Structure formats: structure tokens, C-alpha cells
Amino acid sequence: MGGWAIAVHGGAGVDPNLPVERQAAAKRLLARCLEIGVAALRLGTTAVDVVEMVVRELETDSLFNSGRGSALTARGTVEMEASIMNGRGRRCGAVSGLTTVKNPVSLARRVMDRSPHSYLAFHGAEDFAREQGVEVVENEYFITEENLGMLKLAKEANAILFDYRVPLGVIETCGASAGAVMALDSSIKMNGLPISVYAPETVGCVVVDAHGDCAAATSTGGLMNKKCGRIGDSPLIGAGTYACELCAVSCTGEGEAIIRATLARDVAAVMEYKGLALQSAIDYVMKERLDEGKAGLIAVASSGEVAYGFNSNGMFRGCATEDGFMEVGIWE
Amino acid sequence: MCGGWAIAVHGGAGVDPQLPAERQEEAKRVLRRCLKAGAEALQSGEPAVDAVELVVRELESDPFFNSGRGSVLTRNGTVEMEASIMDGDGRRCGAVSGLSSVKNPVSLARLVMDKSPHSYLAFDGAEIFAREQGVEMMEKSYFITETNVGMLKLAKEANTILVPETCSASAHRMNGLPISIYAPETVGCVAVDRHGRCAAATSTGGLLNKLSGRIGDSPLIGSGTYACRACAVSCTGEGEAIIRATLARDVAALMEYKGLGLQEAVDFAVKERLDEGFAGAIAVSAKGEVAYGFNTVGMFRAYAKEDGSMEVSIWE
């Protein structure tokens, strides 16, 4: 056994002009979450408990796009989704369309542990939340001034109806947005929006514990200005989240690209079926599965390795291993 | 390179061994009819993605299996339908869940893929999109059949959805219910056209007596449905087992990453990925092959190939 290891992320695709204070705040948050995870791992907490605990922290903090601080739908509301997978037994739970549940990842955990199903969404998920007695709040709790501003910009850019999956040279640029430069350089646009307006900032955590068991969890408010009812990759097992005996993976970035790539499952499948080691598997899927899509992921292996990969402009991430290594980063 | 077109359909894995003979015959008639419609489309040069949508629409419109009209009922006695479609040419996909008034869920999934910037829409949002797109909508009662109302009653009496498997032959219980009460009967279609393009589509009412809001494997890309350049796959059975197995993606991954042939990949996935779960899959390859596999008692299925071969079957 290689000891325990943990990685967290706060989204792939970062505005190169992100103010320095915001970069520092992001790194502080990632470091704090890592410390929480590390403290738990030192006490022998299981991987699945640790990933839930860390993602709860990220949801509760308003900085990234999950729980409080979630991106807004076209209607200005919040619809959150999350999933969790326990590599031990390959059990999983997922939720979508949450509007009042304070910690979506914990409801996903309940779906896994306390329901006969794997995935609950919208009204049914909210009913289940109440049956389970999890903490619920008003939808306004999740909405921040900052995201209200972002929504306004996104609507002005009106770029969400762009089919960003088609190479940019083929699409006419839409009308001028409120001063945002619609660069044709696709590396600073994601999901059809300039990265200064919207960066995915989905959150996630992967852990391998002292027993070599792996787990992963991912949580998000989803795509800024999304249609109500839109489900992205984060709650989809095999797309945004995956864990098995070999490894655990959490992804972030352009949801539609991650779904068609079955990105999280593919990291594990490449390890299992091609015999690649963790980093090689990550590099392979990032290169081969995304086509024009932009995304990133974090992963751990049962051997105690931790690794990440991204083809976006930066990814908020951090990792720590039992031998004392700890690192938080944003850029390449 | 291409072996001609090929198409396969299914109407669910897990069949009551006591299913009356007339019902078995009716199932085969429905499968044969839908298969023919798809085969004719492929024969006239239609792309695979059009053929699979066409066939699944037929299956949804027929009340026999568990999709569209004839969907099983939720715990609340309502219908919540879901579907997904994937075009292997470009690996584009569309999915919907929580539909209660859309006549053909697979067609809405197709519109999500072709006419929206998203891949998956659900519940109220999906119904709103359906209205925007002008798809055919029906009264909720259209989808509900007497048979399924009766099934729900039996399921509630059995009340076994939360009870773990008993020691009785587990092959005759699925999702915690005796197979005489409930068999998955999700529908699906996979096709490869003359150009070697593969596509898959899956549609279902989901799990009898499910909690409202429960999403199964059928709308999940990689679980119930998958298509890429190598193959197309549609699955059916215990949804939770198919999800944790990422069954549809794994068939393709085994071909891509382990170099297995189509049938080998299906066999491997069904054997190795399901653990105690019960499910089945149909698949086609870009080369024109057809394969299926199931570890359940029976699977309603049929296939046809350009060379004239055809089969409609239920049992092993």
C-alpha cells in the first residue's frame, strides 16, 4: 500500500485575468479543504466519508460553483446536482435539480445508502430530502450577488445558444456583449461563454484511504444561464464521477464534452483494460476522448498515487499524500 | 470494410418463465414489426441514428413494453419516462428524464441532441423544451394502461422494493420484485448503416413503483446507451446494476482498449461487470455484426442483417 492520498478541485478553466486576491482566496479554500481531508485521513476515516466531508466544505463556501455560490439558471434560480461513488463495492448515489438542499453531496450519499435507487432528481429528490430530514434552506441562500452579475453578463453575451461543439471558425460571432471581448481563441471560451463571464468551477474530491479504498464526489450548480432541467456531467456516474477498486476520478469542465467522453469511467477503463498506470491513463483520456472539448480531472489510485490533467486554461486544484506532500495550484 | 447494415431491438431483459404463450407471441409480433420498420429504413439508405429513433418511436407508441404508452407507474401512480439516443458518428448524444406528457421520449432526446446546447434535460425543464419544440404531447392518461395500474397494486402489496433478495431463485426476482409482477421491459434499438455508422437508443418508463424522481440507466450515456465509431449498445435490466457497471460504455471500451470482438466484449461485460445484478445488452459493430448477452431469465430481442438473416427470440 502506498498510503492515503487526497485531491480536490474547484473547476477546470480559469480566467487568465482573474484578480490576484481571488486566486489567493481560491488557494486558501482549497488548502483548507485539503487540511480537513488530511486530518480525517490521519484518523483512519474511510475514503467515502472523507470525500463527502470535503465536498460539503466546498458547497458551504460561496467561492466555487456548488451549493452556496452556484451558477444560476436562465431564470435566476439555482438547480444543484452532485454524485458520490464508493470504489469499495462500486456503489453510487446522485442527485439533480436540487433547489433547497444545503449540501447536495450529502443527499447523494443518502440516495446511495438509504434508498433503493442510485439517482433521484427534481421534486422527487426534494421530497426524499425532506423524508431524510437533511438540512434545507430557501433557494435564495444559494444565490450570490456575484452570480446575479454573471448571469446578466451571460445573457448579454447570449452565447449559450452557440453550439460551442462546432469549431469556432464556422460560427458567426453573436452581437457585442457588454464589453466582453469575444475572442475566437477557443482556449478562453468554455461552454460558449468567455471565461471572464463564466468558468465552470464545479467542485470535487477524490481520496484513497489507509486501506487502499477509493472514493470520489463531485458537486455543482451547473452551467451559467442553463435551461431549467439541464443536467450536466457532475451527477452522471462514469462521466463526472467514478470510483472502483483501482482508482477514483472527479471531472470538471464542459459538461457535454465530459458526458460524450465518459471521462471518469474511461480513466479507470484505460487502467483496467489497457494496463496503464494512473497518470498515463489520465494523459491518454485527456488527449483522446475530449475532441474539441475543454475539461480537467483529478484522480487517485489504490496504490496511493494522486494525479490530475486538464486541457483547459488552468484548473483550481490541490492534493496531499501521506508522506507529507501538499500542493495547491491553478495554472499549468 | 463494411459488412452491410444490421439492426437489433430489445424489449427488456428478464422475462417471467410463466409468461402466457399468447403474450410471448404478441411480444414477438411487436418486435418483428418494429425491426422491419428499422430494416426497411436502413435498406433505403437512412442513417443509423434515424433508424434507431424510428424503431424506438414504434416501440414507445405500442403499449406492450415499458416505454411511452404502457410505461410502468411510479409509487404515486404517475408515469415518468426517460430515454437517450447516441449517434456514434461524432459521439453526439441526447437524453431526457421525468417526462409525463411527451408522446415519444426518444424523439425529444433527439431534439435535445440536435436542437439544444445541452445533452440532457429533465422534468419540468424537459417538458418546457418539448412545448418549445412543438413535439406531440398527450394527456397523462394516454400513457397509463389497465395492466400497469394492476401491476402497481401488486407491487405495493408485495412491498418488496426495499427488501433484499430472498433465498428463492434470484434469477426470478429483479429489482426486489418477483418477475411475475414486474419485468423491466425497457426498449432499445441499435443499428449500423451501410456506411458503418452506429447508433443506439433506449427508452423506458423505468422501475415499477419507483420513487418519483428516480432516474435509471436508460437515459444515462455510458450506462444504458452508448455509441461510438466501433459499436452501439443498448442495455436493459436492473438499472442500478447497469449504472455501476457503466455497461454500455464498457462493451465499447473492451473493444477499444482490450481489442475484444463485439460478442466477446458483450459476454465479458455481462459476466464481469454486473456482480449480483441482472441485465442484458444488444449491440452492433461498425463491421455489421450483431451481438447480445444477458444473465437474466430471457430477454425480448430481435435482429436483422442486410444478408437476410433474422431472429426473434425470448429465451436462451
Image (tube, helix red, strand yellow):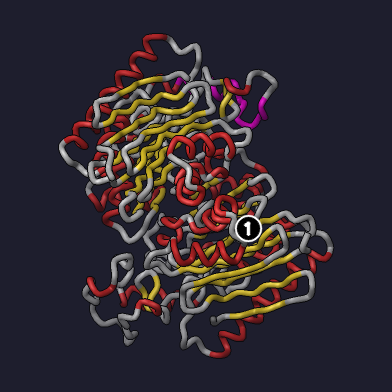
User: Can residue B217 be seen in the rendering of this structure?
Assistant: yes
User: Can residue A82 be seen in the rendering of this structure?
Assistant: no
Question: Mark 1 falls within which chain?
Answer: A
The answer to whether residue A204 is above or below residue A332 is: above
Q: As shown in the figure, which amino acid type bears the numbered disc 1?
A: Ala
Looking at the image, which residue is at 35% across and 31% down? B9
Quadrant in the picture for the N terminus of chain B = top left
Q: Residue furthest left?
A: B44
Q: Nearer the viewer, residue B64 or A123?
A: B64
Looking at the image, which residue is at 74% across and 73% down? A35
Q: Residue furthest right?
A: A43
Q: Nearer the viewer, residue B310 or A325?
A: B310
Residue A231 quadrant: bottom left
Kindly identify which residue carries mark 1.
Answer: A248
**Percent from the top left, x then y, of residue B11?**
39, 27
The answer to whether residue B198 is above or below residue B163 is: below
Residue A19 left/right relative to B121: right
Q: Is A44 colored magenta in this rendering?
A: no
Residue A247 left/right relative to B179: right
The secondary structure type at the circle numbered 1 is strand
**Percent from the top left, x then y, of residue A306?**
66, 67
Magenta-drawn segment: B150-165
Looking at the image, which residue is at 36% across and 58% down? B118
